[in-house]
Amino acid sequence: MMNDLCIDIDYQQLYKHGQRIGGDVFLLDRSDGSNIITATLSDGLGSGVKANVLASLTTHMANKLSFSPIDLNHSAEIIMDTLPIDKEKGISYSTFTMAKIVYANDKSFIRVGLIEYDNPESLRFSGTAPIEWEKRQTVLNRKNAVKREVIFSSEFDMQEGDRLIFFSDGVAQAGVSLGEMPAARPRPKVYGSKVPSIRTQAASGVGIMGWGEQNVKSFIEEVLSKNPDISSRQLSREIVTQAYKFDKYKANDDITCVVVYVRKPRRTLIVTGAPRSRESDRKLGDIIRSFEGNIIVCGGTTAKIVARELGTSVKSDRSPSGNLPPASIIEGVDLVTEGMLTLSAVNERLRNKMLLKNMPEDPAKRIIKILRETDQVEFVVGTKINDDTDDPTTAAKIGVRFPLIDQITQSMRHNYLQEVEVNYI
């Protein structure tokens, strides 16, 4: 059964200017058969392929250890002991932020274990207000390290309206001139007074070391005050876009931001296939009329049945359709498309994690665009063979509707951590 709360996790990322692969790596995973989600962001030393390899190693180690019985803090120490130290710079090959989220089936409790090493400080918000919380410190004593290495760990509960936000230094240091590392910038000589702190600047200001963590926090407060219900995807995009602007649209470093948000779920109903009987047709109409959320109908015969039960008609839609059959319009339904060909395209793109920007403008993209803003998806699948077709090829495709829906369901669960329920009618 669908829950009344969901854990909305998403991220946005831009690569460093001139790079075709990112040195920041984010890994999101949910353990099969358990209520555990891990979200890990690692920033590899340098940029490009080398940094990506190092960050990928770190995130995958963190992911495996998070699902083990080992204490999270001990897991972080194992990662640090495994990662080498750069011989020239004397610093670790990668940084990381690791969140282990454990929750009850009904979301009555959501417990977060957080480990941070050398990334900008994570932020928490309750509604629109920032939250301060206690963290434990573990000091490492690794040979050849030139600076004091500290792992910060903490545990806390999340409730409806709470957010956890973490990001790479490409966000915190945004605005530092392209090609110049922050540490290389000379600090101004100020006699008789302290050097002005980044923390005292306006939310939109950029200091000598870049945007600054405190200014990022102030910016998020401003965004949340204007749009308290903003999704994780949209909020992370706002933060990354602002950092990109400060870099004058030439990213000085990889820019990555992750948002975890506990909120009421956004639901979508997908109806495909004709119901088994006329009585089931009426039941389908009742399901659609009572559903709160987006409604998608896939299939010509299905669309006719839905329109009849809703007391309306199917009209043509002139939106771009690419190589797929065109969409239609039914009053009270958000999207109406052809059936098997369109769903097959949806399945292929979801399975390959294809980005929306790389998809052609067609009905399959419109379905996926709705799904990407959805937390809980309910399929209602008709079990009657379509009587309107004399084409044996089409009839054969209808026969594989059920495994196709199963494949889409698996992709949504494993690739996007969405809750999916399938009902047959």
Image (cartoon, rainbow, N blue to C red):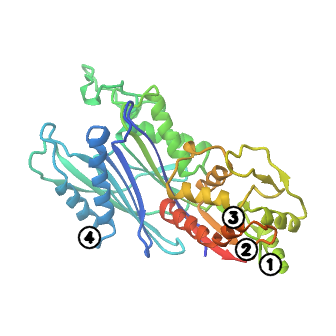
Q: Residue at x 30, y 71 (%)?
A: 68
What's the mark number on residue 280? 1
User: Given contact means CB atoms under 8 Å apart, are the residues at marks 2 and 1 in contact?
Assistant: yes
Packing grade of label 4 (10 A; few <14, some 14-19, many >=20) is: few
Q: Nearer the viewer, residue 412 or 226?
A: 412
Q: In the visual, does 407 lie left or right of 189?
A: right
The residue singled out by tag 3 in the image is 270
- Asked whether the viewer can see residue 311, the reply is yes
Q: In the visual, does 177 lie left or right of 324?
A: left
Q: Amino acid at mark 4?
A: Ile
Q: Amino acid at mark 1?
A: Ser
The residue singled out by tag 4 in the image is 70
Tell me which label, 2 or 4, sits earlier in the chain.
4
Q: Amino acid at mark 2?
A: Gly
Residue 152 at what x, y percent from top left?
28, 54
Measured Cα–Cα span from mark 3 to mark 2: 11 Å
The tally of labels here is 4
Packing grade of label 3 (10 A; few <14, some 14-19, many >=20) is: many
Tell me which label, 2 or 1, sits earlier in the chain.
1
Measured Cα–Cα span from mark 3 to mark 1: 16 Å
Is 135 drawn above or below residue 320 in the view shown? Answer: below
Residue 348 at what x, y percent from top left?
55, 57
